[in-house]
Image (spheres, helix red, strand yellow):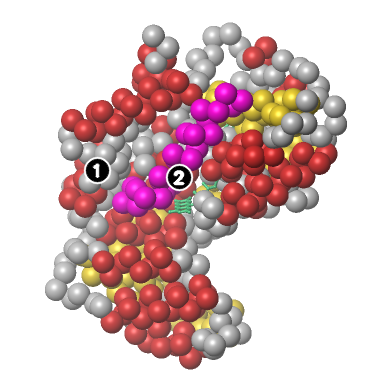
Amino acid sequence: MKKYRIAIIGAGPSGYFAIQSLLNSANEEIDFQIDLIEKLPIPWGLVRWGVAPDHPKIRTVGKVFEKLANDPRVKLYGNVEVGKDVSIDDLKKQYDAVVIATGAPIGKKLGIPGENLKNSISAAEFVPWYNGHFDYTDLDIDLDFQTAVIVGAGNVAMDCGRILAITPDELQETDLAAYALEKFKNSKVKNTYIVARRSLEHAAFTSAELRDLPKLEHTNVIVDQSDVALAHREIDLEKADKELVHNLQAFTEISEKSKPNLERTLEFRFCLTPKEIHGKEKVEGITFQINRMENGKAIPTDETLTISCGLVVSAIGYETQSIPGLKLTNGKVPNENGYVEDNLYVVGWAKRGPSGVIGTNKSDANEVMHLLIEKLAQPKEMNGIENLLPGNLKIINQRNWEAINSFEIAEGEKIGRPRLKVTNWEEAVNIGLQGNQ
Ligand SMILES: Cc1cc2nc3c(=O)[nH]c(=O)nc-3n(C[C@H](O)[C@H](O)[C@H](O)COP(=O)(O)OP(=O)(O)OC[C@H]3O[C@@H](n4cnc5c(N)ncnc54)[C@H](O)[C@@H]3O)c2cc1C
């Protein structure tokens, strides 16, 4: 039996699905010892730091991750950053194959004047802030105004809009970070716009998320019937993609179920390209160029629209973060079907960019792992990561992470919340290490 050592960098969905694929491929001839290296002391990637706190069902995929992590052939090295604590080159020498699964955490910029004003932020900051990511707890955000604008036409934009538009009581039932809950309790935001560059039929929202919107009890979700009618004229329902037809149905339902008596609004606006963010020290408004559509393209007209607002969140995409020794092209790790070079592979958002749902990473990782297995030579029989790490590093293993997990759930129970997230890195490490006792 040949036993191969594989290092996976990044404990997000694509990392876990890569593990699943490798373990499923083990047989009498080959088996694997897998080290999962994660820079944070808490795993699960965007399942914890991205997925909206009011959608807890999506997070149940974590059970699959935990089952994989408890396989004796898998070892978690949390609180270990590749590129800082250990290099990719050293890992390549110590493992039969190394898999990059580091995601795409950097928000794309709008590239317009005023973008650097206070309260002009990216979803790549806003989302991890409300989800309690250690690196974003200090985000200086002010919710002392009536109107917020989200720029973007995908589910991330919708999450940001919905979180701003629902009530603090609705947020209280979630695992939103405690400091963010406090901020939202004092928020004066009543009107939130989600603004897209092209017309409704080109938006990348998914229908399941759209269908949930009319169920919001305290928020009037608005889409102009003329936008829906225009999309109906443009689309041949017989020939159109199923998801698009479902989106149109969902938008039609939203447009027909307006609840004008409610004080809070979440409003979709289409055919607007952001031109400039205004304000002296912080955001006071945003001006858009009004577009007309021609063959699926947004063509700017001479007209503009200005929305007075105190917050602009751009949700227009993500890019991969560079790691020393790793080249990037167009915000991704250049690859051929997941193969990068030598014994190096890439999966997930670092490979494809920010596209697809959690499940997309499963089929994607599976294909790449089959390629990896095909290319394996004789096992190297090296020591793996242990000898590469500085002795003073506080490594968080699976047992340590489970201690953090139990602590958070127990603390949440005390105050009637599903979980009270630990949002201080050092504290998380210390709680985790108590799991060794
Ligand atoms: C705001 C938001 C909401 C979403 N909501 C949903 C949803 O509701 N449903 C759904 O199906 N999909 C959702 N998605 C998409 C889903 O989260 C992604 O498809 C998925 O997380 C991508 O997985 P990944 O493993 O490639 O990246 P990630 O989930 O980002 O995981 C990457 C991991 O690598 C680690 N890492 C990074 N650099 C290093 C390093 N140098 N060394 C060690 N570790 C490192 C990170 O800390 C992280 O844990 C959402 C995405 C976002 C951004």
Say which residue label 1 marks: 181
Q: On screen, 425 above or below 131?
A: above
Residue 23 coordinates in the image, percent (x, y) = 64, 35
Residues at marks 1 and 2, CA–CA distance in whole angstroms: 24 Å
Visible residue check, residue 284: no
Left or right: where does residue 114 sit relative to residue 329? left
Q: Quadrant of residue 434?
A: top left
> Most extreme residue toward the left, as rendered?
261
Residue 221 coordinates in the image, percent (x, y) = 28, 70
Q: Which residues are magenta?
A: 50-75
Q: On screen, 307 above or below 183?
A: below
Left or right: where does residue 404 sit relative to residue 355? left
Given the image, on which type of amino acid does mark 1 rest? Leu
Image quadrant containing the C terminus: top left
Q: Residue at x 71, y 42 (%)?
A: 369
Left or right: where does residue 239 sit relative to residue 250? right
